[in-house]
Image (spheres, helix red, strand yellow):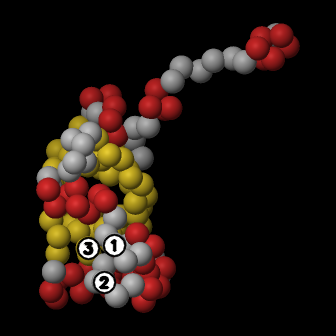
Amino acid sequence: MKRQVKLTTTGRLSGEPRVVTLYAFDDGDRLVIGGSRGGAAKDPAWVGNLRDDQRSTVRMDREVREVRAHEVTGPERDRLWQLVCEEFPLYATYQRRTKRLIRSSCWRRSRTADLALHPSTIRKSFWRPFRHSATCRRRA
């Protein structure tokens, strides 16, 4: 099953939290992702971040989980890549666009965390209080 997730990694150069929206695919108790970058010649930055620090946080809807990533290779990568392409055929197009082998990673789900304890996984705009504009106040 394809689901949209927000991945929070630690920037390998800055040390700051980095959030990216990705598609993840279920494989038993794991989530599988492909580092496609739309078929570009280079891996996405988050792939390098996960290589340096495998610990990350994934937000699915309102649930936040701490996960540990590992890159898959060989026959396991081929099996998972087939699963990803069946769920989202555009990934096969991305692979045809590039000469590099698109990396696949798996996340092993850890304990569930309270969303309020992980504000770095949510864009700051979600936390802004609602404010009425001046035109709304005049109408009231």
Alpha-carbon span between mark 3 and mark 1:
14 Å
Residue at the right extreme?
A: 139
132 in relation to 23, above or below = above
Which is nearer the eye, 13 or 138?
Answer: 13
Residue annotated with mark 3: 104
* Upstream in sequence: badge 2 or badge 1: 1
- Front of the two marks 2 and 3: 2
Question: Which quarter of the image is occupied by the N terminus?
Answer: bottom left
Asked which quadrant contains residue 95, the reply is bottom left
Which residue shows up at 59% across the image and 21% down it? Answer: 130
Residue 132 falls left or right of residue 69: right
Residue annotated with mark 2: 100
Check contact, mark 3 vs mark 1: CB within 8 A: no
Crowding at label 3, few (<14), some or many (≥20) Cα neighbours within 10 Å? many
Residue annotated with mark 1: 42
Q: Where is residue 99 in the image (x, y as percent from the top left)?
A: 34, 88
Which residue shows up at 42% across the image and 89% down it? Answer: 96
What amino acid is at disc 1?
A: Lys
Which is nearer the eye, 30 or 39?
Answer: 39
Residue 45 falls left or right of residue 98: left
What amino acid is at disc 2?
A: Arg
